[in-house]
Image (spheres, grey):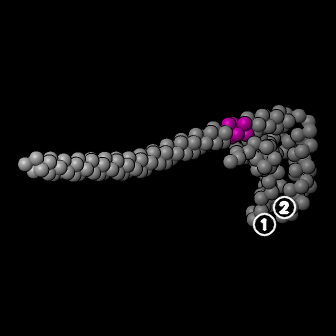
Amino acid sequence: MPDTISKTDNFLKAIEKYAEEQRSKMQSEAEDFKSRELNMAEEEGLKEAYVMIQKKMADINNRISAERSKAESASKKRIFLRRREIEEEVFLKAEKKLVEFTKTAPYLDLLLKSAAAISKVLRHDDVVIYVRQADLKYQKQIIQSFGRKCEIAASDEIRIGGMTGLSRSMGLIADETLDTRLEEQHEWFCEHSGLRITE
């Protein structure tokens, strides 16, 4: 009988050992499974976090670019407006100086030279010389400098001074006004003033 008990004990020990091995194996497999699942979840989480970070970074970069572009545009507009103000200030001062010049003796010399120059271009006898209302007082000197018959008339279009000549038969206008000369300086001023808007 002791043999039977011993066999039974051995059998029970073998079953227990096998059960323990199976339990350890299952526990190990469960740990491996849990570890793999955690790793996969962690990798998936990292991928999602990376995608989310990339999207956020792209959004931030887009917002920064839009704000920078808006700021640059506003800055260029301010610079452009300031350049325009400076240009207007310069030309207002120049206009005032020219108006002051029209009150001096050298201005009459300029008018007479302009009349002689127009006479060389407009050679027909139907020439009308237009001057400011204030310059009609120089009518006799202008006709004398023109050198032949012409009509002198006032023009509201001439604000600063000088004159224009018109020959209807020739279909030509000769412009010797200070107004036009000043206006022609705008382009030169823009090119040579150094007031530029750059990128």
Q: Callout 1: helix, strand or loop?
A: loop
Q: Is residue 104 magenta?
A: no
Q: Where residue 139 is drawn, which disc sits there?
A: none
Residue 142 point in image, percent of width and height: 87, 47
Residue 80 point in image, percent of width and height: 66, 42
Residue tagged by mark 2? 122
The residue under label 1 is which amino acid type?
Answer: Met
Taking depth in this image into account, of 157 and 88 the one nearest to the observer is: 88
Residue furthest to the left: 1
Residue furthest to the bottom: 170
Q: Is residue 168 above or below residue 24?
A: below
The residue sitting at 58% across, 40% down in the picture is 71
| Structural crowding at the residue carrying mark 2, measured as other residues with C-alpha within 10 Å and reported as few (<14), some (14–19) or many (≥20) | many
The residue sitting at 81% across, 47% down in the picture is 192
Q: Is residue 138 above or below residue 117?
A: above
Taking depth in this image into account, of 9 and 145 the one nearest to the observer is: 9
Q: What's the magenta region?
A: 81-88
Residue 197 point in image, percent of width and height: 70, 45
Contact flag, marks 2 and 1 (Cβ < 8 Å): yes
The residue under label 2 is which amino acid type?
Answer: Leu
Taking depth in this image into account, of 54 and 186 the one nearest to the observer is: 54
Q: Callout 2: helix, strand or loop?
A: loop
Residue 10 point in image, percent of width and height: 17, 49
Q: Where residue 170 is drawn, which disc sits there?
A: 1
The residue sitting at 78% across, 49% down in the picture is 191
